[in-house]
Image (cartoon, rainbow, N blue to C red):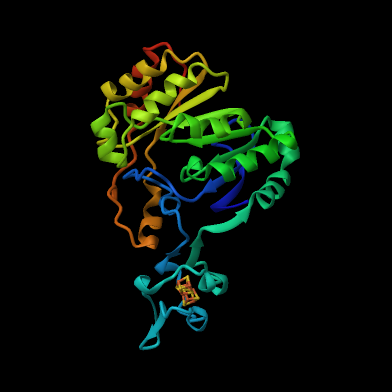
Amino acid sequence: MKGLITDIQRFSLHDGPGIRTTVFFKGCNLNCAWCHNPETINPKPELLYYESQCLGCLHCIPVCPAGAQRAVDGQHRFERDRCIACGRCAAVCYPGAAVLAGREVSAQAVLEEILQDRAYYQRSGGGVTLSGGEVLVQKDFAREILALCREQGVPTAIETNLCATWEDLQTVLPLTDLLLLDVKHWDAAEHRRWTGADNRLIHENLRHLAQVQVPLIIRTPVIPGVNDSEPVIARIAECLAGLPNLLYYELLRFNPLGENKYRALGRENPFQGAAWLPEATMECLARAAEGYGIRVKRD
Ligand code: SF4
Ligand code: SF4
C-alpha cells in the first residue's frame, strides 16, 4: 500500500540507538504550538516557499497550472491561496525556494531506501525509526513497512505521541523493537491548551505498556513557558517511575530553529523569537526527574 511521507533521513543519530534511517510520516493528530516539523502536521501535501532563496528566475511560472506562481512587474510572486500543491514548481526550482512537503510512496519503495544502509545498522546497533507527524495516523502503512523490515531482519522503532486507541497501537506493537514516546504535559487542561488534544488516551496507553515487553524511551520536549518548571517535569517523572520497561527518560531542549519553516508555510509561529533554554534550567529539571529513581538523559 501507499502512504504520505515528507522525508526519509539517512544516518540519523537522534531517533534511537545506533545509525538509523528515519521515515517522517505526514499528518498528525496533535497540533503542538512549538512543533519544529510543522510541515508534517497537515495530512495533505503542501508547498513550502522560502522567499529568501528565490532567485527570481521565473522558471516556475509556466509549469504552475493554478496561477499561483506569477510575475508582477517582472518580479516573482507566490500566491499561496491559489496553490493546489501539485509540486510542479518544486521540480524546476533549482535554488530550492519552492519545496513540496508530502510525497506518496509505497511501503516497498520505503523498504528499498531503508535497506541501503543495512550494513551500518548491523555495525552500530541501529535500524529504522518511523516518525512524523504521527505514525499511527497511517497505521496500516506503518504496519506494512514494519513487517517488511522484520522479514529483512532490520531492527524497528516507532516514535509516537501515544494519542491513539490501544487497539490501534496493537496493530504495530508486535512488529516494533523499541518505542519512543513523547509526553508533553501530565495536566489534562495544559495538554489540551498546548497540543489541542486530550491526554486521556496517553495515560491509558502508558498503563497498558507497563504490561508488555517492548522497551520504552520517553521524551519531553522542554518548552519555555509550557513545561520548563520542576513541578511539571517531576510530575511526569513520578508517573513514569512505575514502568518496568522504561530504558530512560530524555529531556529535549526547545529548538527555536524551526522558524524558517513556519514562514515558508505561511503559518504564524507562536514561539517566534523564543530563546534557547539555559543549560542551568535543563540541569535542574533533569535533577528533579532523577529524584524519582529513573535514568534521565538530556540533549
Ligand atoms: S523557480 Fe524557484 S527560484 Fe525561480 S522564481 Fe520560481 S520560486 Fe523563485
Ligand atoms: S505546487 Fe503546483 S499549484 Fe502550487 S505553486 Fe507550485 S506549481 Fe503552482
For the point 32% across and 19% down, the residue is 234
Q: What count of labels does the image hold?
A: 0
- Along the line of sight, the residue nearer the viewer: 220 or 142: 142
98 displayed left or right of 174: left
Percent of width and height locating residue 212: 54, 19
Residue 273 on image: x %, y %: 28, 50
For residue 100, above or below residue 184? below
- Placement of 105 over or under 215, stated as above or below: below
Horizontally, is 65 left or right of 105 in the view?
left
Task: Mark yes or no: residue 243 visible.
Answer: yes
Q: Position of residue 154 (x, y in %)?
A: 70, 35
Q: Which quadrant holds residue 296? A: top left
Query: Between residues 57 and 201, which one lies in front from this camera angle?
Result: 201
Q: 293 left or right of 215?
A: left
Nearer to us in this view, 246 or 256: 246
Residue 20 spot, x, y in % from top left = 63, 38
Viewer can see residue 287: no
Q: Quadrant of residue 72?
A: bottom left
Q: Of all residues shown, which one is farthest toward the bottom?
A: 73
Q: Which residue does the image show at 40% across and 56% down from the upper left?
A: 261
Q: What residue sits 52% from the left and 69% below the top?
A: 87
